[in-house]
Structure formats: structure tokens, C-alpha cells
Amino acid sequence: MSDPVATPAAPAAPTKDAEAIVKDEDCSKEYEPVVRLAEVETKTGEEDEEVVFKMRSKLFRFNKEQKEWKERGTGDVRILKHKENRKIRLLMRREKTLKICLNHYINPSVELRENVGSDRSWVWHGVDYADGERDEATLAIRFRDSTNATAFKEAYDSARDYLRKLLDGKDPDAAAGEEVKAEEAKGKESPEEVAKVDAPNAEEAKEDTKEAAS
């Protein structure tokens, strides 16, 4: 005949020491950190620049050794103008990681060339510092469509023209202001011109007077 199943013993009553441990664990006392870390402001180096142009694109770099294009990253390519020295550069950060994959000043003498077989891609040669070191590279950038590609080229060429004037000792900002004033003036008529339009023709005035008299 088998032995009956043993009945589990009742748990022992907690000792005073155990009760004290539980009370200590339930303690809600707050402790101050030993060391307080000061908040550090993170700077990107773009604080003194204004965004002239921004467009999502994909960047490539030509590998001379393997003789093929290598993708550098996808993200927003931006044209940034420094507020004080007025230098203009191209900057691009990879999506998600925000790591820089393009960083070089625009050279007025460097022209964008259309990539063979594509109306939405441009190729150029630049001295890039994306990795922190000087790198003379052949780069290519591709956009979603030809409209975006054209918009980028127009902004790039406008920056080249601005820098060219700056190098020639001219003030491109002042020149731009004068051009705006000239355009506004074209849309406004001088007082003399308004007077000519509003003044009645003498012959017509005589005819009107005769008709009124009759």
C-alpha cells in the first residue's frame, strides 16, 4: 500500500529580522545623486548659418581604385550661407544617424555637369571634408525628379554668382537690394505718367463741350 501524500507544512511565521528587512525595502526615502551632471549644449557648427536651399537627395562618390560609384548616403542636401563671412557651403547628413556625408565650400569656378543618361542627377568635383580630412573627390547627387534637380542647380548657380561678386570686391547683398528696388520701380508709374493718362485730351474736351452746349 502506497504512502499517503504528505501535506505541505505551513510557512513559518516571519521573524522580527525579516519584518525589519521588509520595512527597510518599503522605505520611500529619496537620495540625492552624488554627482550632478551639468547640461551641455550640443552645437552642430551650423548655428551661424542660414539655409538657402534644402532638398532630399542621394549622394555618390566615385571610387578611383575600383572605378565605380559608391553610395555615400541619403538625406537632405542643404546650401548654407554664413551670416558673417558670407561663405557658402554644401552640407548633407545621413538620415537617422545624422552623420555628415558631404561638407565643402562652393567654389564659383566649379560647375555642375549633367550626369550621362539622367536628367535628375549632377556631377562635380569638390574638396570635401565630410570625414574631417581633405578629400578631393568626384561627387554625384541624384534627386527624385528633374524638377528637383533643376531647382538644386539654380540654387547652386545662384550661390556661385553671389560668391563671384564677393571675390570681385562687390557687395552682392547690396546689389540684390538695388535689383529689388529696380523691379519695384518698374511696376510703379511716375506722377508725370499718371498725369498724362488722367489728363483729358484737349480736342476731346472741346467736342464734349460742343455736345453739351447743343
Image (spheres, rainbow, N blue to C red):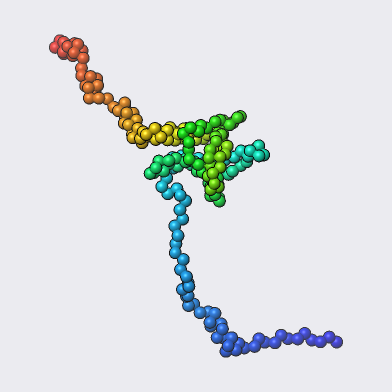
Q: Is residue 30 above or below residue 145?
A: below
Q: Is residue 202 above or below residue 5?
A: above
- In which quadrant of the rendered image does the N terminus lie? bottom right
Front position in the image: 82 or 182: 82
Spot the residue most to the left. 213
Residue 115 placement, left or right of 51: right
* Quarter of the image where one finds residue 11: bottom right
Spot the residue most to the right. 1
**Does the image show residue 7?**
yes
What residue appears at the point 57 percent right and 89 percent down from the top-left corner? 16
What residue appears at the point 58 percent right and 88 percent down from the top-left corner? 17
- In which quadrant of the rendered image does the C terminus lie? top left
* Quarter of the image where one finds residue 64: top right
What residue appears at the point 61 percent right and 29 percent down from the top-left corner? 117
Front position in the image: 53 or 13: 53
Q: Is residue 34 above or below residue 200?
A: below
What residue appears at the point 53 percent right and 82 percent down from the top-left corner? 24
Percent of width and height locating residue 91: 50, 43
Total numbered circles: 0
**Does the image show residue 142?**
no
